[in-house]
Amino acid sequence: MSVNHERITQGSGKTGAAHEDHHGAGFLTVGNFLSLLRIPLGFMFLVVDDARWVAAIVVVGAATDLLDGFAARLTHTESEIGALLDPFCDRIFVFLALVSFLPTGRIDWAGFLILILRDIFTGGVFLVGRLAGKEMPFHSKIGGKLTTALQVVALLTLIFYPGYVKLPIYVTGIVSVYAIIDYGMAGIRKWQPDPKTVVSAG
């Protein structure tokens, strides 16, 4: 493979990502490590009670979410698996954090379900697509990133101002609906046959 071909491959979106997956730095890159760090951080919610430490976990988790993509770009280790790990670890982190608040009574089941509405939908569609043999999109999009940011705001509100948590819950719910529609449209486009393929088949 020539140097020019490598440069073209690395700069061509999904092809570049696939190239990095198989011939790049491997799975455990700095970016992927930062993403995976959110899973043990999420389990810490289940054993930590002090509000300051819980808030620190939320902040550290949010920081890893901001830095994982930056680290991947900085070290030139962007990959398809990294793009999947980021939102996956976000969902695990937020889910475990919210579960830890259910026994405290600071959030009810309705609020819990609203806050993870986007995660339930996207995760379900992704799994159904895979079972159907379709490569469904699971990458972070603007609506998804904003939903995750609002989930963090809701978590911090639950810690320090539980009486005001309904506002971030409702706002997160509204943005989640937008993220679901955006994701659903991307899935529909993914399921539609490629016009070029249809023409060539005809």
Image (spheres, grey):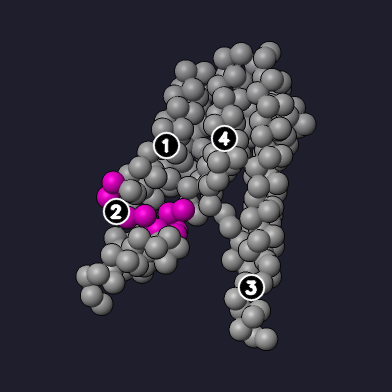
Question: Residue at coordinates 70% horizontally, 46% vertically from top-left?
Answer: 181
Q: Nearer the viewer, residue 44 or 114?
A: 114
Of the numbered discs 1 and 3, the one sitting upstream in the chain is 1
Q: Report the quarter where the N terminus lies.
A: bottom left
Q: Nearer the viewer, residue 29 or 173?
A: 173
Residue at mark 2: 76
Distance of label 3 from label 4 (alpha carbons): 32 Å
Mark 4, other Cα within 10 Å: few <14 / some 14–19 / many ≥20: some
Report x, y in % for residue 182.
65, 47
User: Bounds of the magenta span?
Assistant: 74-83
Of the numbered discs 2 and 4, the one sitting upstream in the chain is 2
Report x, y in % for residue 148.
56, 36
Residue at mark 1: 66
Which quarter of the picture shows residue 162?
top right
Can residue 155 be seen from the camera position used here?
no
Q: Is residue 29 left or right of residue 127?
A: left
Question: Residue at coordinates 59% horizontally, 66% vertically from top-left?
Answer: 135
The type of residue carrying mark 2 is: His
Residue at mark 4: 146
Residue 195: mark: 3
Can residue 19 be seen from the camera position used here?
yes
Where disc 1 sits, the SS reads helix
Mark 2, other Cα within 10 Å: few <14 / some 14–19 / many ≥20: some
Report x, y in % for residue 71.
32, 44
Of the numbered discs 3 and 4, the one sitting upstream in the chain is 4
Of the numbered discs 2 and 3, the one sitting upstream in the chain is 2
Q: Is residue 65 left or right of residue 159?
A: left
Distance of label 2 from label 3 (alpha carbons): 33 Å
Mark 1, other Cα within 10 Å: few <14 / some 14–19 / many ≥20: some
Mark 3, other Cα within 10 Å: few <14 / some 14–19 / many ≥20: few
